[in-house]
Image (cartoon, helix red, strand yellow):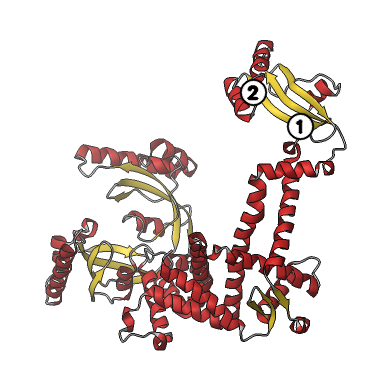
Amino acid sequence: MNRKHIASIAVLAASAFSVAAKDEVVMTVNGVDVPRSEFEYLYHKNQQQQVDPQTLDEYAEMFKIYKLKVADAMSQKLDTLPAFQKEMKQYRADLATPYLTDSLYLNSLVREAYDMSREEAEAFHIMIGKAASDKENEEGRALADSLRSEILNGADYAEIAAKYSVDRASSNAGGRMGYIVSGRFPYAFEKAVFSLAPGQISEIVESPQGFHIVKGGKHRPARGTVLVEHIMKMLPPTATAEQQAAAKASIDSIYDAVSANPSIFEDLARELSDDKGSGRQGGKLSWFGAGMMVEPFDSASFALQVNEISRPVRSQYGWHVIRKLDAKGPASLEEMKPQLLKRIANPQDERFALVENHLLDRLRKKHRKAIHTNDIDTVSGATLRDMEYTWLYENEPDYRNLLNEYREGSLLYEASLREVWDKAAKDEQGLDDYFNIHRADYKWTKPHVKGILVQATNDSVADLVRKALRDASDDTALKAVRKQFVGKASIDRILMEEGQNAMVDNIMFGGAPVKPNNKKYTVYFVYDPKLLNAPESMSDVRSLVTSDYQNQLEHDWVERLKSRYPVTVNQKVLKKIK
């Protein structure tokens, strides 16, 4: 975290005091005033979340302790920790997102995308590919500009496409890509395709892939999506006449069979289709929209009626027999909006940058007076955002309250972790001392068996385990014994009362003999068993001791805070709160 970010958090804290000064002060903790607005916000939020709401006085006492802990966290400079600074910076930005979003502008982009989705547009383009260097890309754009000028001056578009376009799928067809649907190509390219009149030539359109000269084509209503299955006989581009004839004969035979008995379509697809991926699914493909499949497969699929089977269709990949399973019309705006918003929010989408630039323009206008530079366009996006975050803190109570709540909650958590939770979990000596002092508080209503339960594959293994356990003085040694007999014996520490384990009941409490649950074990015993009427050591009741020790640490911490940091409560203001 650099000094700039630390300074911005410091400004935030300073703003808190200036905002607080406008409110009546409900209490002062270690010299820091707590405004009535902050107290009321948290008090009412607490009341809504409680099954049995606290009285105002009860809450005020709890709030005072909360503020004391925050004061302690500040005195330890926990707010300067890099992890805390990073977390606050991210939360501040996330919290501001709804305030920074221009819904009207965003909805205009959604509407534009939706309107394009209602049509299919015939796309023509000449593409000059991008290169690795800026110099080569400048040359590529210059070439595209030159070719566009030639076309505008009467040169044949199709001839230029065949000679220069790097999109080999369309260059030999006069640049024609076929009908496309929106959402599959870069935004600038789609916008040109869908906005041009038939025959109209675009300006140079730049996409991540290259520079495009787009020519407008025909438009037709969107046809939605279809679900089909097919049986395919593949043909390589260099297929001989004999291969072509064999493939045609094979697909004709398949067509005759499925026409006579449609119920065998999926079985034949599994058996005979050269498209093995779909063949395993009975020939079924995923739902697809216009332009997502090669022609004439695309057109044939949409032209069929549901359950109708096509005559053999030849594509660039081979022969197909297609059966249409289902169809859907274009989705509504309400249905498409979540998908469109997600697409626009993707940093890879060009509209993401449009939204960002629109935001920065708004912020420059809003904070123009506060920016001390003649060239406002040079002010960075980060600086503009910092200014907006400060403005929101000073002018939007909900934003301010949530940010303060999160900030102090994070400080409280970190301080509690250090003073109570981690300390109780890791302080072995402290846990032992607490247990020894309060040993009488830990009692059992029934005797407990303490020892090591062993299950072994046979008596010989059991004897070897007994011998090995004599030298296992600690958990590390016990772990080594377990590893030594893996697959031959199960070895577990136990502390349990009667009724918890049938094998232990048999050995220690006179219960009936049993067989281990795991059939490979035939022998069981308890090594070094003890029958205890009360806990022998802290480890016997660790979870209880840890909880009680935490409570003790919490109590001691609060008492220290009360003596360390002064607190004054303005009872007159407190009584005004309902």
Discs 2, 1 touching: Cβ within 8 Å = no
Q: Nearer the viewer, residue 521 or 490?
A: 490
Which residue position holds label 1? 495
Left or right: 532 as drawn, with respect to 406: right
Where is residue 252 shown, x and y percent of the image? 34, 42
Q: Residues within 10 Å of mark 2 (few under 14, many from 20)?
A: some
> Which residue lies at the image location 46% right of the left edge and 65% below the top edge?
342
Q: Nearer the viewer, residue 492 or 209?
A: 492
User: Residue 5, which numbered label?
Assistant: none
Q: Which amino acid is tagged 1?
A: Leu
| Residue 356: quarter of image | bottom left
Left or right: 59 as drawn, with respect to 339: right
Q: Mark 2 against mark 1, which lies toward the viewer?
A: 2
Q: Which amino acid is tagged 2?
A: Ala
Where is residue 568 shown, x and y percent of the image? 72, 77
- Provide the secondary structure element on which disc 1 rests: strand
Q: Is residue 102 visible?
A: no
Where is residue 108 shown, x and y percent of the image? 44, 78
In the displayed structure, 260 sits above or below 66; it is: above
* Quadrant of the frame with the C terminus: bottom right
Q: Is residue 528 visible?
A: yes
- Provide the secondary structure element on which disc 2 rests: loop
* Quadrant of the frame with the N terminus: bottom left
Which residue position holds label 2? 472
